[in-house]
Amino acid sequence: MEEKNLTINDIAEELGVSKTTVSRAISGKGRIGEQTRRKVLDYIEAHNYRPNVIAKGLAQNKTFNIGLVLPGDYNIVELPFFQNCMMGICKLASERDYDVLISMVTAQNISQLERAVTNHKIDGVILTRTLTEDAPMRYLKENGIPFVAIGSTDDDTVIQIDNDHRNACRELTRNLLGQGVKKIALVGGDESYIVTGNRLRGFQDAFEDMPQWQGSREMFLNIEDGKQVDGIVEQLLAGEFECIVAMDDFLCNCVLDSLQRRDADVPGQVQVGSFYDSTFLANHMPSVTSIRFDVEELGRKACELLLGLLEGDAVERRTLLGYEVRMRRSTR
Amino acid sequence: MEEKNLTINDIAEELGVSKTTVSRAISGKGRIGEQTRRKVLDYIEAHNYRPNVIAKGLAQNKTFNIGLVLPGDYNIVELPFFQNCMMGICKLASERDYDVLISMVTAQNISQLERAVTNHKIDGVILTRTLTEDAPMRYLKENGIPFVAIGSTDDDTVIQIDNDHRNACRELTRNLLGQGVKKIALVGGDESYIVTGNRLRGFQDAFEDMPQWQGSREMFLNIEDGKQVDGIVEQLLAGEFECIVAMDDFLCNCVLDSLQRRDADVPGQVQVGSFYDSTFLANHMPSVTSIRFDVEELGRKACELLLGLLEGDAVERRTLLGYEVRMRRSTR
DNA sequence: CTGAAAGCGCTTACAG
DNA sequence: CTGAAAGCGCTTACAG
């Protein structure tokens, strides 16, 4: 069990070859006789030797670690997103023999990220969200660290990957309008999140798509808590709005709570939809119309981009992943 | 900005000393003249040199990485727990110049953990939960990897740290009984989670504490979803139970939903409590009586234990952290 | 107090 | 096709 760690040196001695040869057999780089290769590989297999990645890294000036930046100041409904992202990233990294090292940052404090970088512990970084004023991103750019951003940003020097929020919201909204909704409202969150802008644009796109649509619409942004939502809902009920779309499940949940407390029937009196399905509302009664993204795949692809970047591949600057609009019982 | 990396060698040359001396100035190990030390340290400060931790590690046969094992198969309400844990761990690790490398495992697949270990990428591991049949734990023990477990286990050769679930549940239950509840039920989750057993025991302790208490109690375990809960609630309402305690916020939420659908007033007709406050129900109306733990502190302490272990300190085998019972409006 | 040398476990020109 | 040697950036006996 506790067999002392085999090294490339041990193997070389044991097999009567040089360690150069052993190294070549393992890496597959450099010419080497087929027989010698087999001999080495067989030995390795038999003694299940695993090269020391750290030493390899030192020699190649790499770490085979990628940094994953996770927000320390999250909203609870965002958690499944980060978790699924992380899963996709970890899986791909693992397949390619990289490891994932995490740095938790807040808007005010990115010291964990700085540490990982200045300590030479990572080859590149994945950002799991983008802000309009993005400290981690700025830091990485200034220091020339390779990174990819999950989320969107105007800065098109950064490699970014995102779900197509805009078109997803557009399609969901269009569906609603197409069903004859005449008074519709949008409740959205923090505008310092870039995704908020994208969702908003998608919502607006839908109206441009349907110039024949007649009715009134109302938009509320930077809404933070249930209290505010409750006020808005009160106002909307008074105005006899028939449909409320929330930008995410947290807000949507607030809307539903508020409607329930006010005895408004969903979807009879008011239809409700969410622009982001975090699985929070999956089991809600009635089930809520929303949009589904494959977040694990998003993480996986992001990681693939970063590894490509690190290995010098030409890499797509901007990747947009699909979506799936799910009309459920909270709308008609 | 893109100044090529300074090495210990560059500094030695620049200062006309040996690299041994530079190394000693940095590490503080070995005798060294105060003047030389200052000189080196000043130079380092001025050029803000950071030693290459990887190289240091190679020389010392360490990595300065700890592995964090996170479940890939989680229930959504557990997420804030893992997130807060991670925060505490990352903060302490960062302070001590360690990094945190994550492995996501499931009951069937611990390959990410195995990779990190066999690739020599970590010095030790933190487990973020314990199961009765715990594959990661078994693997770590078999391979002699130092680790600490967040959560409890019977195996007292393992270093473990946990919140005092048992006493917390005991106190909460006692409060309820003390208020004159006569028919009380417990709804609990998966018994393969050790914490389930602890909560159950705490619940039972309360009755032993109050032998004078007269009434009926009912316990339901291994409950998985809202459907099952709904059935139980129906049965309990029929039996005129006045209090339902759920083992966690997920189940509690199911209970509340079910009660609401059945028009049962909380706390008027039925009082409701939760044995674990994940912040999910924090904003619920009415606010839910439950137990609060300082999870970030838990993670922090766990990390402290592991680092102590790695540095050869004598380390407490079993650490139990406090709790806070919060009586709220869902009970009287 | 200080330094030369060997070593950690790999890789990679260079020479043969 | 194969190997001796130098090197990645540190540490650490050992000697002085």
Image (cartoon, coloured by chain):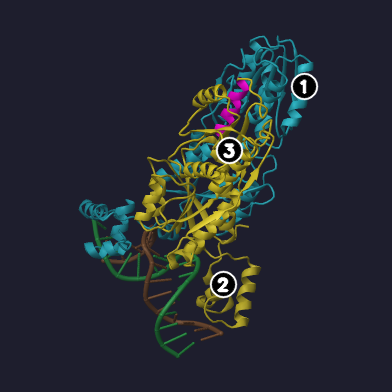
Chain colours: A cyan, B yellow, C brown, D green
* Helix, strand or loop for the magenta stretch, by majority: helix
Tag nearer the camera, 3 or 2: 3
Q: Residue at x 71, y 22 (%)?
A: A261
Disc 3 to disc 2, C-alpha distance = 40 Å
**Residue under pointer 3:** A79
Mark sitting on residue B303: none
Subunit of label 1: A
Between A179 and B17, the one nearer to me in the picture: A179
Whether labels 3 and 2 belong to a single chain: the reply is no
Q: Residues within 10 Å of mark 3 (few under 14, many from 20)?
A: some
Is B285 placed above or below A123 here?
Answer: above
Disc 2 to disc 1, C-alpha distance = 64 Å
Quarter of the view holding residue A11 = bottom left
Is A152 placed above or below A119 here?
Answer: above
SS category of the residue bearing label 2: helix
Tag nearer the camera, 1 or 3: 1
Return the x and y of residue A320 as percentages of the image width and height.
Answer: 55, 30
Mark sitting on residue B26: 2
Q: Residue at x 65, y 73 (%)?
A: B42
Looking at the image, residue A54 sits to the left or right of residue A267; the answer is left
**Residue under pointer 1:** A234
Span shown in magenta: B250-261
Return the x and y of residue A61 as percentages of the image width and height.
Answer: 47, 58
Looking at the image, residue A182 sits to the left or right of residue A87; the answer is right
Q: Is residue B259 magenta?
A: yes
SS category of the residue bearing label 1: helix
| Residue A151 in view, yes or no | no
